Image (cartoon, grey):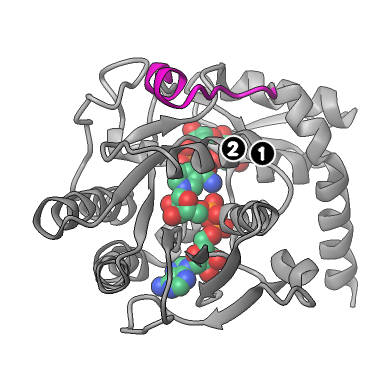
Amino acid sequence: MRVLITGGAGFLGSHLCDAMLAEGHSVICSDSLLTGRMENLAHHAHEPRFEFLPQDVCQPFDPGNIDYLFHFASPASPVDYLKHGIETLRVGSAGTLNCLEIAKKHNAKFLLASTSECYGDPLEHPQKESYWGHVNSIGPRSVYDEAKRFAEAATMAYHRYHHVDTRMVRIFNTYGPRLQIDDGRVISNFMKQALRGEDLTVYGDGLQTRSFCYVSDEVAGIVALSKSDEHLPVNIGNPNEFTILECAKVVLRVTGSASKIRFEPLPQDDPRQRRPDITKARTLLNWEPKIDLSTGLQLSLDYFRAAVHASSTATLR
Ligand code: NAD
Ligand code: UDP
């Protein structure tokens, strides 16, 4: 296949580029580099089946004939999407409509990277795909949450009205190598702080929960979904739930750091609990995650060490 991956220079998109190339496909990666980095793709510089297209996907463009479009472009960390609020709304809305038009024009399959944020601060726990969510449409996180909810609505509409062959994955907190150390997400912050011997910043009382999925598990789930015929959203995430305080302790253990924990204010509308119900992915895709948090952090340790080292030498220069 000839596959277009938007946002392919980002954390998840770059791992998806790797997976698609490994399956023997040709990959076009289109990215505006708003939050992504060319370093994530440097290992494909001499790969003839790989092409980088510098492109803001909110602007009309035509990549030529494609068989599959994976729409991953969007800031994803709360720090990034709060900084780029309007761009986030735009890429979820205009960007998604553009990508759906491209898929329609080329009769390509389409997969949307959606998110657990569609459930907002959920009142149902764990979250099943049938839950409609509890989202503050005017709160600070709404630039991301509502953009993704619009993107899901647009995807369903192109499926219903134009018969585009669509899929939607609701991704739950994913981490691993290439997560940017300055994106403010909890795993990048804690790993960076632990390796630098700084305090780990726990927001609020640290009793809010998240369920962390290692990147290879996440990508395997996405690839399995891309080959299925399911058009409704599917949760792909790890159902092992941790409080943020527990997560901090796992990071301290894995890094062997003597850092302390410091409490800071909880951001507005921070979801209190999050855990995917993955019954659908298990049944439909025969998929489930294999890597627990401790193992995943160990697998990420070399990357975070190198990234912390590079950022401190850049600061010294
Ligand atoms: P990321 O910030 O590392 O990657 C996003 C990529 O999109 C970047 O390379 C960025 O430059 C690019 N981009 C942003 N706006 C663009 C535009 N207008 N045109 C072209 N490129 C643009 O984030 P990520 O964690 O890799 O997330 C990738 C996708 O997965 C996003 O759609 C995100 O919403 C979704 N997702 C991720 C997670 C997670 O835990 N990582 C969770 C839920 C959903
Ligand atoms: N968090 C924290 N300290 C940090 C960064 C994040 O306690 O340095 C908390 C944050 O308040 C949230 C959870 O960790 O409750 C996950 O935050 P993240 O930004 O990784 O993603 P979210 O799931 O909120 O989108």
**Residue drawn where x is 65% and y is 18% of the image:** 246
Q: SS of the residue at dot 2? A: helix
**Residue drawn where x is 46% and y is 27% of the image:** 285
Q: Which mark is residue 254?
A: none
Tell whether label 1 touches label 2 (CB within 8 Å).
yes
**What residue does disc 2 label?**
220
**259 is within the stretch colored magenta:** no
Q: Nearer the viewer, mark 2 or mark 1?
A: 2
- Percent coordinates x, y for residue 54 in the rendering: 53, 83
Left or right: 33 as drawn, with respect to 267: right
Task: Using the image as rendered, state which of residue 258 and residue 2 is in the foreground.
Answer: 2
Inspect this view and state whether residue 175 appears. Answer: yes
**Residue drawn where x is 25% and y is 20% of the image:** 123
Q: CA distance from mark 2 to mark 1?
A: 6 Å
Q: Is residue 25 above or below residue 139?
A: below
- Percent coordinates x, y for residue 219 in the rendering: 58, 42
- Give the position of the C terminus as an image quadrant: bottom right
**What residue does disc 1 label?**
216
Q: SS of the residue at dot 1? A: helix
**Residue 10, located in which quarter of the rendered image?**
bottom right
Task: Using the image as rendered, state which of residue 226 and residue 13 is in the foreground.
Answer: 226
Left or right: 132 as drawn, with respect to 224: left
Classify 10 Å Cα crowding around label 2: few (below 14), some (14-19), many (20 and above). some
- Percent coordinates x, y for residue 298 in the rendering: 83, 31
**Image: magenta residue range:** 278-291
Task: Using the image as rendered, state which of residue 3 and residue 234 is in the foreground.
Answer: 3
Q: Is residue 11 above or below residue 258?
A: below
Task: Check disc 1 and give the amino acid type.
Answer: Ser
Task: Check disc 2 and give the amino acid type.
Answer: Ala
Answer yes or no: disc 2 within 8 Å of ligand 1. no
